[in-house]
Image (spheres, grey):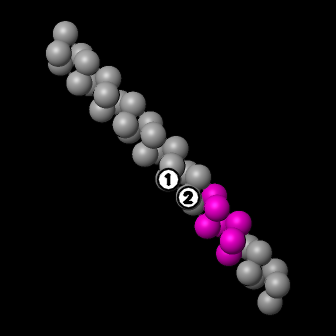
Amino acid sequence: MTGERMGGEIFNTAIIIFTLTLVGLGIGFLLLRVQGGEE
């Protein structure tokens, strides 16, 4: 049971990190696109 619980926590953490990474890349891409459009 302990192993399964740890595995679940690691899996949830991986999902959070993956989501934050996608959001960060999306925001960065939009910022670069806006800066490029202004110039």
Question: Measured from the top left, where is residue 31 in percent x and y?
Answer: 69, 71
Give the magenta part as a residue range.
26-32
Crowd band around label 2 with a 10 angstrom C-alpha radius: few (<14), some (14–19), many (20+): few
Please report contact status of discs 2 and 1: CB closer than 8 Å, yes or no: yes
Q: Could you say whether the residue bearing mark 1 is in a helix, strand or loop?
A: helix
**Figure quadrant of residue 1:** top left
Query: How many badges with numbers are in the image?
Result: 2
Mostly what secondary structure, the magenta segment?
A: helix
Q: Quadrant of the C terminus?
A: bottom right
Q: Residue furthest top?
A: 1
Q: Which residue is mark 2?
A: 24
For the point 59% across and 52% down, which residue is it?
23
Q: Residue furthest right?
A: 38
**Figure quadrant of residue 4:** top left
Indicate the amino acid at tag 2: Gly
Crowd band around label 1 with a 10 angstrom C-alpha radius: few (<14), some (14–19), many (20+): few
* Horizontal arrangement in the rendering, residue 33 relative to residue 6 (left or right): right
Question: Measured from the top left, where is residue 18 in percent x and y?
Answer: 46, 45
Q: Residue furthest bottom?
A: 39
Indicate the amino acid at tag 1: Thr
Reply yes or no: does residue 28 show up in magenta: yes
For the point 30% across and 32% down, which residue is it?
10
For the point 25% across and 18% down, which residue is it?
5
Q: Which residue is mark 1?
A: 21
Q: Would you place residue 2 above or below residue 24 in this image?
A: above
